[in-house]
Amino acid sequence: MQSWSATRDALAPLLEKYAQVDNGADGARYPFWALKHDDLWILGRAEDLILTSRKRRPTPESLDQVNPVGGLRENDYARLRSQPETAASTAASLILRYFYPLPPDLLKDFGLHELLAGRWADALSPKPGESFKDHDAILRAYGSQKMARIGCLADGILSAFSDEKGPYDDSRIPDTNWIAYVGDGLSGDQEITDGNKLMAEYQIARRPLRFWHKPYQGPFSFESWAVIVQRRLRWGVGKDKKWRREFLWVLAPVPSPERETWSAEALEALDADTGALHDDTGTYRPSDVDPQLQDASESDRDAYRRLAQNAEANANRRGQLKKSSLADRFVRDPSARAAVLRRCKDSCESPRCDGHPKERTTAGKSILQVDHVQDLARGGPDVPWNMIALCPNCHALKTYGVNKEELRCLLAATARQLHTEALL
Ligand SMILES: [Zn+2]
């Protein structure tokens, strides 16, 4: 327990330096008095204090006169003293939540230098790799209340959960370890509310969040820290099985919340992001990717021409940008993919297909994979003439097969030919 005068003298300069408080001595009244309502802090002789007219806090005069003592509850204090790792993790959470990015002198000024210098981010828990049986087990360990797919753990830091078996179609972006994370909201057009609102705030502030992933039949694990490098709008199918507009948050994994550890790729993508929404829903329609919705008023040729033109225009725009960002290079154009799906008519496009060219999934959908003949990462354009629909067998031959180079040449010629024919 420390007296008001000692607490005030220690806190006042810190409040002025780090919380932009004009009068630190007056500002210290707030935590000294109000934290007891949060059950974090106890106060002796509080009954002797005279409150301000609105009874919000004691008057400065009576605080100085009574000079009561205040401090953490005894068991909390004992725990923080006896368990340095708990103290470090607690302090690190508060730093990330309230003082991010970390001001240079803060650790020293708060007397935390010895405990946390050079390792504050490592002290945070949960730690990457930590896994749990299910979502509820995570909340029991680290969350204070029921939380949806996107929300904050008890330490106030944002978590995004991805369950492979769930209704959302999150995925890795091909050729990268980036994640295309579908926004919050099960049915109907998604809006910037709830989890999406938190994501938008983190995107603007460039704050790191926790990305959790649960593979099919596997445990839920805190896979990685990540930063949001782009927000897109796509067509997707809601839980009610109807098409709707949904957000796609492009996440770049980072090794820790400390900016110094982030890859050049992640930093470049962050710098290029203005926070603006990239709306892809105008360049293709749900009926382009869902054969059941196709209307007879537009011929296959007209639909293919429309989609291919959109894809070419997008590719041109992306190439013409002075500095095309990584997100713009790696995130696939849905109109290009839709064009190829329209062109292939549910059948593998490899002329040497010995696989299952018309196989379907248990959900009754085509099992084809739309692949770039020349990879995007190697500078291949994201346009239908560089893309081909392949069955899993042909896709494996193209990726791993001993004759993959020869097959690539054949597929390149095939894609161009199919493209030309589809436009005739
Ligand atoms: Zn095939």
Image (spheres, rainbow, N blue to C red):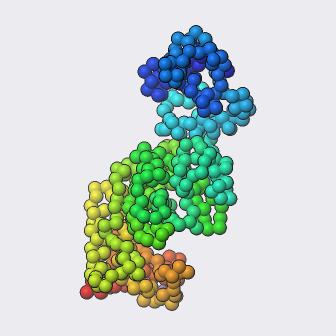
Locate residue 122: give its quadrant: top right
- Residue sitting farthest toward the top: 65
Q: Residue at x 46, y 67 (%)?
A: 238
Position of the N terminus by quadrant? top right
Residue 13 position within the rendered picture, expressed as x and y whole percent measured from the top left: 50, 20
Residue 264 position within the rendered picture, expressed as x and y whole percent measured from the top left: 44, 51
Which is nearer the eye, 132 or 178?
Answer: 132
Residue 260 position within the rendered picture, expressed as x and y whole percent measured from the top left: 49, 43
Q: Is residue 288 above or below residue 78?
A: below
Can see residue 387?
no
Can see residue 281?
yes
Residue 62 position within the rendered picture, expressed as x and y whole percent measured from the top left: 56, 12
Which is nearer the eye, 10 or 244?
Answer: 244
Which is nearer the eye, 114 or 273?
Answer: 273
Position of the C terminus by quadrant? bottom left
Q: Residue at x 58, y 23 (%)?
A: 32
Which is nearer the eye, 292 or 260?
Answer: 292
Count of marks, rendered view:
0
Q: Residue at x 40, y 56 (%)?
A: 191
Q: Residue at x 31, y 62 (%)?
A: 318
Locate residue 314: give its quadrant: bottom left
Q: Is residue 112 above or below residue 372?
A: above
Residue 44 is left or right of residue 108, and the answer is right
